[in-house]
Image (cartoon, coloured by chain):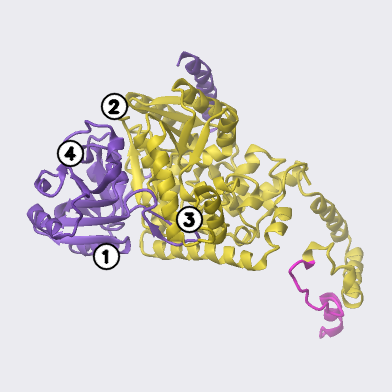
Chain colours: A purple, B yellow
Amino acid sequence: MVAINIFISMSRESILKEVKKNQPSLIPLPDVHLPIAVAAGNWIAALKERLELLHVDVHEFANEGAVLHFLKQQNRKNTDRVVTTIPAFQSVATIITSASEDAHTLENVELAIIPAHLGVAENGAMWVTDALIKYRVLPFITQQLAVVVKRNTIVYNMHQAYEKIAGTAYEFGVFIAGPSKTADIEQSLVLGAHGPKGMMVFIVDE
Amino acid sequence: MHTNVTNHADASIDFNLDEARVDWHDKTLWFIREKRDKASHLIPEWEDLREYASQIKNNVLSNLSEYLVQFEEKAKANGVIVHWAADAAEHNKIVHQILKQHQIDRMVKSKSMLTEECGLNEYLEANGVEVIDTDLGERIVQLAKEPPSHIVLPCIHKKKEEIGELFHEHLHTEKGASDPQYLTAAAREHLRETFLTRRAALTGVNFAIAETGEFVICTNEGNADMGAHLADVHIACMGIEKILPKQAHLGVFLRLLARSATGQPITTYSSHFKIPQPHQEVHIVLVDNGRSVHLGKEDFRNALKCIRCAACMNTCPVYRRSGGHSYHNAVAGPIGSILTPNMDMKKNADLPFASTLCGSCSNVCPVKIDIHDQLYKWRQVLMKEGYGPAAKNASMKMMGWVLSSPKLYDFSGKAARWVLRNTPFVVSNKLNPWFKEREMPEAPKESFKEWYLKNRQS
């Protein structure tokens, strides 16, 4: 450790000195003010449309009880490992309350059901932080992901999202917009590059 | 022209040998450019967004020394270990040193153009460290022992049959299989095993926030997250220009980045790394490698605003028809052609000439870099410094001589028309690049001047 720090600190000073010498005189930061292009009444419709384009299976429900009912109807193998961080789903999934085990043990999770803080209508992104998922790798390592988001947390664009995020405490946060995907082979879209092959979003009233 | 360095024009000749393939490459990239257009047209305030992004980046460059110090302070307070690297060699040494401390000799890596720029993979491999690239496109070019040809779509130059062949050899997929779904599934299995068994992960950085010390990584595949969250050690490498002042600015840049890159409204994952997980070490390596000197060049500093979306590459008629490898650098296309001469003017003297100056690159750039103006300005600098292509030097001198004398000019025109009409083979041959892939119009009998003198009504 000591050895590294010695030769690094020398570069730090020389880089900062050169940058300071060469940067132009101060150009002020702009105040970003942009109108919200779509009226609030249409945000849910916009979100649903966007999620469908992202190959997300999207449903609206009155509450978590209705989501539970839906989950119970789904054909799932008994051997599938289903986990959740939402207590209401304990009859269909194993509850995760903390990251008490090695995260590698999640490798065989078939479905993870997690909440999101908010959703963005314009791009379909769900904002999720470590407090909601316990294991950071959970929404990536699972084969299928389900996200529950409250209707009244939906915003239209990313500026509004960051207004809500500002000042909130998180150690890791991620916007998730659909299942993992790639088009690296001749621009053919394939879902499930490394992360989930499919995603569901449940928009709940409360 | 230069010893052991390919020049763009020569490399393009090789790329153009297979005409059908060039057409395919051209169309594929144009398709992505069209997706970018559609996505941007859905945002009524698109041009305002570009303007804000440009202004924010102008501010960043004008206050970079302070933002870097602020970022370092916040990142350290978050529990992240911050390193500074003056050049590629120091960057590579730092990464190797971190791995050595943890006795790690196998690492996963997600996409980082900076580590391509620094030649990290080669350095680590020479030092006995195995590196596996995890972005599907990067894994493909790594298996093919090639560099990426595009900063967002690393294997855009490869046909699925070639990828099938590579996977058959390395991942034991069925011989002759080329279905993208099947091949991607095979890579998923292979890389999942890799993610689960590696203790170190290296990632790039898309944005680093001075205000909070967090850094943001954008991927569609989720490979950066699979690597970083499962590893004991996460090393994130970034150029010093990647700083944004405030978290709220991410709203502007995340709206622009993926739309400009691939026409998506946002990448699947935009991950914000702030505080390391318990029992995990997170390192950030801040890399200069010529950027601080570049910052001092008034005509060229705007290129440091680049967010690596590749919109300029997808739209460039020269890039689309010459391929990324012809630019012999980690960052190809128009942006690469204005970034790389800052690092090595002699080695990259050919690149500012690899453009038609049509200006499409500047028009699609989400941070409004004056790319085609800089290409033009680089040409002036390179000719002045004596790095211009030899043939161009000679022909420019000849032209200057001819244009300085009206008599000589008249005579040259006459001679040229006579040659074109009577002995076209003298100029229309393999030695003259102007006749490559082109048919010349028939030469007129007389010049405009001669015609005008004959026909004017006095």
Q: Position of residue B210 (x, y in %)?
A: 38, 33
Report which residue position mark 2 lands on.
B278
Query: Do the residues at discs 2 and 1 belong to one chain?
Result: no
Is residue B436 found inside the magenta-colored segment of the image?
yes
What SS does tag 1 mark? helix
Of A59 and B178, nearer the camera is B178
What number is the disc on residue A96? 4
**Front of the two marks 1 and 4:** 4
Q: Earlier in the sequence, mark 3 or mark 1?
A: 1
Residue drawn at x 62%, y 48% is B337
Q: Give the residue type at disc 3.
A: Asp
Q: In percent of the image, x 16 and y 36: which residue is there?
A: A97
Disc 1 residue type? Glu
Quick check: marks 3 and 1 in contact, CB under 8 Å? no
Is residue B304 in view from this perspective? yes
User: Is residue B362 among what the camera can see?
Assistant: no
Q: Which mark is residue A184?
A: 3
Alpha carbon distance from label 4 to label 2: 17 Å
Q: Which mark is residue A49?
A: 1
